[in-house]
Image (spheres, rainbow, N blue to C red):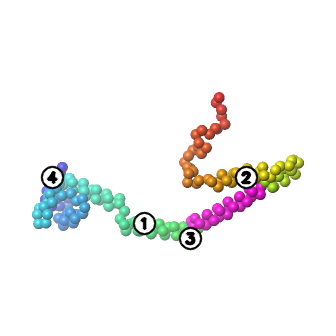
């Protein structure tokens, strides 16, 4: 506990005017030891007032005021706009459309693969292969890719196959 003083003595100890203390008293959390009310003398604990001043100063320096937040958000929007104009940033819809087109092209290519393979295998080796044998495997792979859940994928996971997956080394 610090020294119990009146406003005049507190202003001399801290080095601010009595008027400043009158303004500070209106702020939430200002530490009165005795709040005498209007026209009466208040008492203050010097240690508590100094702690309040330090906490208040830190909060002001660290905390973001609403106006600061608005200014920061406006600056962020300007940066995004500039990045788009410079070609460093593009709308997600543009990439989604391009990615979707690539996926459709890859699927089409994979589905046409059995006919090409059957023809090549027959031409090179004289073996007749059932097209459906290859197509079933490709369709199963496409179905697996189609059901892939991006949100469930953990990119930080070091072993994507799981801890029980065999690494090919048998110690038995």
Is the Cβ of the residue at disc 4 closer than 8 Å to that at disc 2?
no
For the residue carrying disc 4, how many other residues have a C-alpha within 10 Å: few (<14), some (14-19), or many (20+)?
few
First along the sequence among labels 4 and 2 = 4
Query: Mark 1 and mark 4: span between their CA atoms?
Result: 43 Å
- Can you identify the residue that label 2 sits on? 138
First along the sequence among labels 3 and 2 = 3
Which residue is at 87% across, 51% downward? 123
Stretch of the chain drawn in magenta: 88-113
Q: Where is residue 49 in the image (x, y as percent from the top left)?
A: 21, 56
- Can you identify the residue that label 1 sits on? 72
Q: Where is residue 72 in the image (x, y as percent from the top left)?
A: 42, 66
Task: Name the quadrant containing residue 28.
Answer: bottom left
Q: SS of the residue at dot 2?
A: helix
Query: Mark 4 and mark 3: span between their CA atoms?
Result: 62 Å
For the residue carrying disc 1, how many other residues have a C-alpha within 10 Å: few (<14), some (14-19), or many (20+)?
few
Identify the main secondary structure in magenta: helix
Is the Cβ of the residue at disc 4 closer than 8 Å to that at disc 3?
no
Which residue is at 55% across, 49% downward? 154
Q: SS of the residue at dot 4?
A: loop
- Can you identify the residue that label 4 sits on? 3
Q: Which residue lies furthest to the top in this view?
A: 172
Q: SS of the residue at dot 3?
A: helix
- Can you identify the residue that label 3 sits on? 85
Task: Name the quadrant containing residue 113.
Answer: bottom right
Which residue is at 59% across, 45% downward? 160
- Is residue 12 in view from this perspective? no
First along the sequence among labels 1 and 4 = 4
| 3 vs 2, front mark | 2
Task: Tell me if 94 is positioned left or right of 18 in this view.
Answer: right
Query: Mark 2 and mark 1: span between their CA atoms?
Result: 51 Å
Nearest the eye: 135 or 56: 135
Query: Mark 3 and mark 2: span between their CA atoms?
Result: 42 Å
């Amino acid at each position: 506990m610090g020294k119990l003083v009146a406003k005049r003595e507190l202003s001399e100890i801290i080095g601010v005017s009595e008027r400043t203390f009158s303004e500070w008293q209106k702020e939430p959390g200002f530490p009165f030891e005795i709040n005498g009310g209007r026209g009466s003398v208040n008492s203050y604990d010097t240690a508590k007032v100094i702690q309040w001043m330090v906490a208040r100063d830190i909060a002001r320096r660290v905390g973001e005021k609403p106006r600061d937040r608005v200014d920061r958000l406006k600056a962020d929007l300007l940066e995004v706009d500039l990045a788009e104009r410079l070609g460093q940033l593009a709308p997600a819809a543009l990439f989604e459309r391009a990615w979707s087109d690539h996926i459709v092209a890859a699927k089409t290519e994979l589905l046409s693969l059995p006919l090409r393979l059957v023809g090549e295998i027959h031409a090179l080796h004289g073996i007749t292969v059932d097209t459906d044998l290859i197509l079933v495997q490709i369709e199963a792979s496409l179905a697996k890719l189609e059901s892939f859940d991006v949100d469930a994928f953990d990119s930080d996971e070091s072993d994507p196959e799981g801890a029980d997956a065999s690494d090919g080394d048998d110690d038995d």
